[in-house]
Image (cartoon, rainbow, N blue to C red):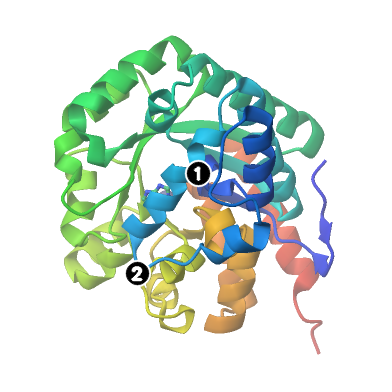
Amino acid sequence: MPPTDGPFGPVMPTAELHIHIEGTLEPEMLVRLAARNGVTLPTTDIGELRSRYRFADLQSFLDLYYANLPVLRTEADFYDLGRAYLERAAVAGVRRAEIFFDPQTHMANGVPLAAVFGGLSAALADGAARDGVSADLILCFLRDLGAGAAEETLAAALPFREHFIGVGLDSAEVGHPPSLFRDVFGRAAAERLRLVAHAGEEGGPEYVWEALDELAAERIDHGIRAMEDPRLVGRLRDEQIPLTVCPLSNVALRVVDALEAHMLPAMLEAGLRVCLNSDDPAYFGGYIDDNLEAVRRELGLSDAQMATLARNSFDACFAPDDAKERWKAEVDDYAARNAPAAG
Ligand code: HPA
Ligand code: ZN
């Protein structure tokens, strides 16, 4: 069973729906896998590696993120990566994780897809059995490699269809609009895969419109720039389309100036179905519990707002309805136990 108490008291149950497994590669594991696989790194000094985790924008982050990934070579490497994330997620209160992975990067690095799926699927099975975390995989297409490459990736992954529940769209956003991926998303839908897309992180509201209208995306990853378009905010609210917001990521990639300036309170105020996530926690300064704590502290969110974020995360997830109801009841219990005593 997952822990119900963290080092500082009870931990709120939550789902994490925007987490790139490659973005959980901590410097310690980077060094260990490099040694295991005979890969040379620019430095093996953990402090020095961590000091490079400062970014000007999304692209400067992606450059480092991709540069680190050749240390992942074997099924055991993918297992270790997935296992470490799920252990950490359980401590953070995560009951349900829907985990992105970037197969195109690994295939380009010469890793067979069978090793990627084999290692990650084994880690997910152990995470369920040992930590009580329900988890599934979502295959992301790298939008900067284009639609043809996405089509080829989907075709290569379909023999492993039982190992993933959906497809997403990530990597460099601006200049690679969702509409380019309409056909491949249509093909994924025909395979009964769930559909999500990064949009409105660095790209404007028009990317969110396209993800909804051209890709039939069921959830929008980030989506914060939707707040620039009142008509889009109305659509997202009326249809209760989930937005997987990642505050520490937004600050680290300078999408927002500072946490205190984040649009999360305005998104909640507008009635949007927002949930909190860590995106790439090894790079952006914290896991989902760190994100939750940071917004509570810096944005002054109330206990009720924190519980709303958690309920939204379960409403937004792709697990069966009975599990979603069970987890939301756990949130209600948590909120009741932590409510200030009356009188
Ligand atoms: N945005 C886009 N692509 C990504 C990210 C992100 O934050 N992390 C990993 N791939
Ligand atoms: Zn992301």
Q: Is residue 298 above or below residue 174?
A: below
Secondary structure category for the residue under label 1: helix
On screen, residue 323 versus residue 112, left or right, reads right
On screen, residue 278 versus residue 199, left or right, reads right
Density class for disc 1 (Cα within 10 Å; few <14, some 14-19, many ≥20) is some
On screen, residue 198 versus residue 312, left or right, reads left
Q: Nearer the viewer, residue 290 or 341?
A: 290
Q: Nearer the viewer, residue 277 or 326?
A: 277
The numbered disc on residue 76 is none
Q: Nearer the viewer, mark 2 or mark 1?
A: 1
Q: Nearer the viewer, residue 61 or 197?
A: 61
Q: Quadrant of residue 258?
A: bottom left
Q: Quadrant of residue 200?
A: bottom left
Residue placed furthest toward the bottom: 343
Q: Nearer the viewer, residue 254 or 304?
A: 254
Q: Position of residue 65 (x, y in %)?
A: 45, 48
Q: Is residue 198 above or below residue 298?
A: above
Density class for disc 2 (Cα within 10 Å; few <14, some 14-19, many ≥20) is some
Q: Position of residue 307 (x, y in %)?
A: 61, 65
Residue shown at 27% from the left, 61% from the top:
202
On screen, residue 233 versus residue 62, left or right, reads left
CB-based contact (under 8 Å), mark 2 and mark 1: no
User: Tag 2: residue type?
Assistant: Val
User: Which residue is label 1 attached to?
Assistant: 68
Residue shown at 56% from the left, 26% from the top:
73
User: Tag 1: residue type?
Assistant: Asn
Q: Position of residue 218 (x, y in %)?
A: 34, 42
Quadrant of the drawing holding the C terminus: bottom right
Q: Position of residue 227 (x, y in %)?
A: 27, 70
Q: Is residue 322 visible?
A: yes
User: Which residue is label 2 attached to?
Assistant: 255
